[in-house]
Amino acid sequence: MSSHGSENYDSTARRHRHANSSGENKKKRTPTDDRRRRKKTQALSADALAQLNERNAGSGNDTAQEGEREHRPRPRREEPRTKRHRKERSEPRRDEALRGEPRPRHESRTRRESRPRYESRTRYEAVAQDESRTRDDDRRTDDERRTDDERRRGNRRKRDDRRRRDDEQRDDRRDELLGELEGERRPRKTRRRYNDNTNNEHDDEYRESDGYARVETGGHGDRKHQRRRDRRIPSGAILEEGRSRAVQRGHLRGGAVGSKSSTETVEKVKAEKLYYTQSTTTDEEAKKKKKKKFLIFGGIGALIVIVVVVVAVVASKKKNSGTSSGSSSPATGLGSISPSSIPADAPSYLNPYKWADTTDFNLTYTNETVGGLPVMGLNTSYDDSASANDDTAPLDKAWGSYGTTPARGVNLGGWLSLEPFITPSLFNKYQSSLGIIDEWTLCSYLGATNCASTLEAHYATFVTEATFAEIAAAGLDHVRIPFSYWAVAVYDDDPYLFRTSWRYLLRGIEWARRHGLRVNLDLHGLPGSQNGWNHSGREGTIGWMNGTNGALNAQRSLDVHDRLSQFFAQPRYANVISHYGLANEPRMTFLSVSEVMSWTQTAAAKVRRNGLSNSTIIVFGDGFCGLSRWQGQPNDYNMALDVHQYEIFNNDQIVYTHEAKIKYACTDWTQQTDQSMDTSTGYGPTIVAEWSQADTDCATYLGNVGNGNRWTGTYNVGNASLNALTPKCPAQNATCECTDANADVGSYSAAYKQFLLTFAEAQMYSFEQGWGWWYWTWDTESAPQWSYKQGLAAGILPAKASQRSFQCDLSNIPSFSGLSELY
């Protein structure tokens, strides 16, 4: 604040005191006032008044103030002794003002609080103020009060001096400790950052003057001051006792904490020193600590890598051992994907933290759908430049004519639609009395939670990206992926695992794309079951287009295709999806053919209307009615007829000898294919989406769980026209057995291996007279004659599908000498 402001401030205070000393504004009477009134005073003479006015005129005060004082009542003239006392009292005050020391605490509280705390005064300003105070004191005429005031001020100055000395000693000690600290240690970043923001000028001013007189520690004055301090806000008490520096640093250790004595203040500084000593390091120590941390974290990282490798090896061994059962554990660490990014109410098929496998999935949460089906898990980018092998076009190039370049593919059976003979380990652990014979009964028995963990563990391990790489390496160029309607929707009391297989289907398509394989989508199970076999999901009654809910299930199937076709009409699938199947093996021998064909046309029209690529072939099944049955059926939607050729499921054909089976494949099946391909005698485009080199039906659960087999005459399905209760091997007697057929493929005789290879190549030749074939299936747990993968390894399938040694030259059929017909 400027000196002009100080003068105004003092003038205001003086006016207040003059008003109180006048007759119009009397103070409350006190004993001192009574004594003052009893004292006899002498009025000043005219000469004395003139001399006083002349002296005051040279005091340096401004004219306005002097004029104001001329109109005020003048005090009575004091005795010479009083003047002497006044002079003695004013000299220390002049010295005090020149030193810039604070005013005594008995001053008006208003004046003390409103005057700037750290104001620097010039010599003349201090003198002017002192003379003003002197004139005020002149108006005090009571000798006893002046004497008491002087005594109290003297005592107070003594206490102030003692307190100031104590404070200076504490400050010196604190500065020494802090100096030692700053010389030994580099401050923490937190402290440096704080000090950079601290007003150092303000701190220097504090060292010069606190703005408050100190209270001497101990004694009555100190106790009285403590009581007053306790009634004030803590910051005021702290500042008055000279502990503002502790407040400034207090935040470093949890806030400002004041001390009650100088000893505690020193102890606080020591504590601060200890804190900074413990929390700061030299450059050399920092390097050591950094190296130590690096070694610790490096060791932890190495341990984690070892654990991951061990777990991966164990998992790989489990997968290669051929078992796919067991429960799965949800994902725990997903890199940058935070659990908070997934809504709490997200269903499990949209929550990657609940997935058993996250490999090659896009884990960023989205609830976006196409056709009502989620895109969650799909990566936005894709590449169609790959080709399966050197003999086939890449995906982004047209395949050409399937009539001249037939498809050579394989099924991924038993993966997304269970089939007990492919993965018997999922079924043979239960007692037969439980009646667990298909996916319906399995999930009904396990319950939703166990069904989910069991099946997802199977989905995640039974087929991997390596599967698609191996398929392409075998010279194959197409893959058929069976899946069922519960990948899209569930109804009523369905116990199936909802939507989980959908995610694996999408990933399987992307893996096929990566390896240049074209995909044949096959809806293997329809609502109500279209054939009553276990691979439709539920063995028993046919409820699709049959029974009380037949029409409803037929409509539900159309709804499923409505959603599927909308989803797969996306441009990203135009090159990779080559075939789109409407219904796998509808059992038309138990259904109305006309109704099935009407439904087929409706479904095909819906699929095309939803935008499925015109280059994608829509597939419908022959329904076991024979290829000749479909001549004249309309083909307005680029469709193909699908026939599944198996000799072993026919009681008349399973009894053929080894040579007769090969001849039947080369002649009869070739002839049927040729006739079907000719629109004058058949439908036209024809594919064989399922076939096998197996010459027996001995594989466990092949004829449904617990039904036996035809080969040994134990096949009993409760229908006399279908049962095979007498042996159907070529010998057709009790000598028929399945031991050799179910033995490990490594124990097969050379003649039997030669027969199986020839039988497979004969079928390949026959089916390539149409638009191609898909072997059933790529892999099994314990049925090598149904596994293309195991057949390759055993040498009973050609190393390359397009490079075969037998081309149905009937004059060149091997003799298979020494091969028993019971084998």
Image: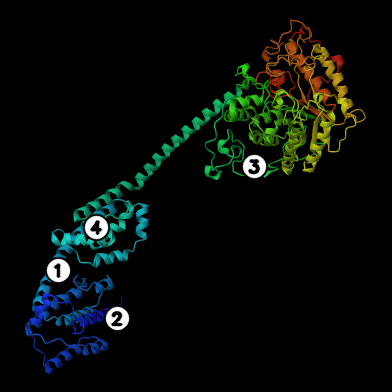
Badge 1 amino acid:
Arg
For label 1, count other residues whose C-alpha is less than 10 Å away and answer few (under 14), some (14-19) or many (20+): some
In the picture, which quadrant includes the C terminus?
Answer: top right
**In the image, is residue 612 above or below residue 217?**
above
Confirm or deny contact between disc 4 and disc 2 (CB under 8 A). Answer: no
Q: Secondary structure at mark 4?
A: helix
Q: Secondary structure at mark 1?
A: helix
Q: Which residue is mark 4?
A: 175
Name the image quarter holding residue 120: bottom left
Badge 3 amino acid:
Asn
Which percent across, then down, holds residue 165? 16, 62
> Going from the N terminus, do you reach mark 1 or mark 4 first?
1
Q: Which residue is mark 2?
A: 4
Callout count:
4
> Going from the N terminus, do you reach mark 4 or mark 2 first?
2
> Going from the N terminus, do you reach mark 3 or mark 2 first?
2
Q: Which residue is mark 1?
A: 157
**In the image, is residue 587 above or below residue 601?**
above
Q: Which mark is residue 379?
A: 3
In depth, the one of 483 and 467 nearer the eye is 483
Which residue occupies 87% across, 29% down? 630
**In the image, is residue 252 above or below residue 581?**
below
